[in-house]
Image (tube, rainbow, N blue to C red):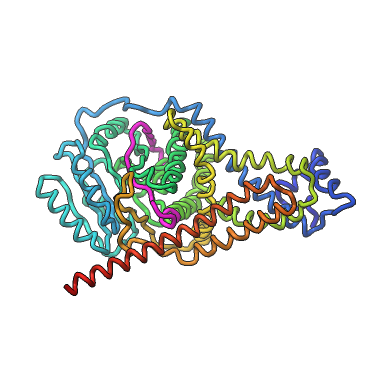
Amino acid sequence: MTATALPSPLAFLLAAPAGSLFRGLFDDTFAGIHQLDWFDWALMIPYFTVLVILSMYGMHRYEIIRTYLKYRKRLPKEPVARFDELPLVTVQLPLYNERFVVERLLEAIGKLEYPREKLQIQVLDDSTDETHPFTKSLVARYRAEGLPIEYHHRSNRHGYKAGALQEGIETATGEFFAIFDADFVPAPDFLLRTIHFFADPNIGVVQTRWSYLNRHHNLLTEVEAMLLDGHFVLEHGARYGRGLFFNFNGTAGLLRRKMIEDAGGWQHDTLTEDSDLSYRAQLAGWRFIYVPGIDCPSELPVETYSFQVQQSRWAKGLTQVAGKLLPRILRADLPARVKVEAFMHLTPNISYPLMIVLSALMLPVMIVRFYMGWLQMLLIDFPLIIASFWSISAFYVMAQRELYPDRWKRSITLLPMLMAAGVALTVSNTRAVLEALFGIQTAFARTPKYALAGEKRQALEGAEYRRRSGWLPFIELAIGTYFLGMVAFAIDTYNFLSIPFLMLFVAGYYWAGLTTLWQEHQGRLRWQRQVELARSAANR
């Protein structure tokens, strides 16, 4: 089969009449030196096809920035109407083995400024460790003090978080639900500032912006905060402002009971039950409100593997939602812009397996292109780099500039680490996406939290709170070494312009693998010390 017959973007460029330029860039360049054969094309075409697909998602980031800047003035600050009488609200607190943060959570919920006769608090605890008796005693104490709080414990974890929330509805008295994950700390006036948006009967969800208690705990948490800020500032802002679908984030928001029931309730066939419900509700005609001026503090993962577990769960869940709902969305009577944005929102994690393909092809393609002149490489590569990688820098720096106009420039210095962190997610998220595509079901994996706020005041204790990384860090180190070999090849062939780009991959994979192994080693040492101290105390 000839190159022009292959169904790839590069093949179409080569086949087009205007493609003589591209044919010259490839064939004429090698005249008298090296003529591309079928094996070279078998490497080059998939390599550039992957780059073009990644570039499409990169160009979408530019479109998000443009849309946000155009429509940001539409973001609401205050409700347009208010209830004459406050409605009944049920606060739902789903828990699973959250010993370190549950006390802080209940303390914050106990301070909510809302009429007690209009409030119901449900602690939905699926814990299998000491969190269960500890939380039960806390709830009993608050209840004795007059707080309208109930404790519900399940031993089967059926449906995980979605199952707990759905079972909670059966005994709920509220017309609206406020949901907070265990590591969130809502302000006392949170309900009073958000509930009045529901005075419009068409509103199904009010989502607020996440902020972070431990943003400056370490370099990882600073990068995580930047990643999430991009989502909450630009993506949510652009989608809401233009009237596109966007998702409830599973916490730090309120939902109308009628909307949940109308959309079919909480379902647990995906790992992101919040996105699943969000799209089903908006397909049913419900409107969502995003209020960036109201934030809810939360805690970021402080360990590399915990961060990877969280991100892989989100990647798998969103891909599952895409498989479940995209056909329905594309068939629905919706504007084309809504369908396109839904597709781009639900499918970006496909970039992770594509990055693995790109990584595998990069070294042989570098060898094939060794004889290509710098001008030809510039004409082909530079637009793809602008679309794929510069868009990341523009996207996250813009979000920081919007949030922190007086100190956003520091975010520029964090960009290399941010890109390396994205690389560090490649292997774990690729596995998650492939599991979603092939229908492989896995349990809902919690993200360990330790009630850390700002400073490193508390040791990360409790070995049972950590998930073991297994083979993952060793694969990451192996891929990092592969890229280190590419750096050596680039030096040997005087391809110095590619070295900074390749070093991002080296840094990302090595950082992920080495920090995970180091943190797990330190955890084992702490656990051994705890065991020794316990034995010493028992022998006294």
Asked where in the image residue 389 lies, by quadrant, the reply is top right
Residue 176 drawn at (x, y percent): 26, 41
The quadrant the C terminus occupies is bottom left
Q: For the point 68% across and 52% down, which residue is it?
A: 47
Q: Does the segment drawn in magenta span residue 285? A: yes
Number of numbered callouts drawn: 0
In the rendered image, residue 33, in percent from the top left (x then y), is placed at 87, 52
Q: Is residue 404 visible?
A: yes
Magenta run includes residue 468: no
Going 33% across and 63% down the picture, which residue do you hit?
526
The front one of 217 and 112 is 217
Which residues lie in the magenta part? 283-308
On the question of residue 165 being in view, the answer is no
Image-based side of 419 in relation to 220, left or right: right
Question: Is the residue 209 above or below the residue 421 in the image?
Answer: above
Q: Quadrant of the N terminus?
A: bottom right
Residue positioned most to the bottom: 539
Percent coordinates x, y for residue 81 in the rendering: 29, 25
Q: Say left or right for 388 vs 396.
A: right
Tell which residue pokes out farthest to the right in this image: 32
Depicted 172 relative to depicted 446: above or below: above
**Residue 381 location in percent, x, y?**
70, 43
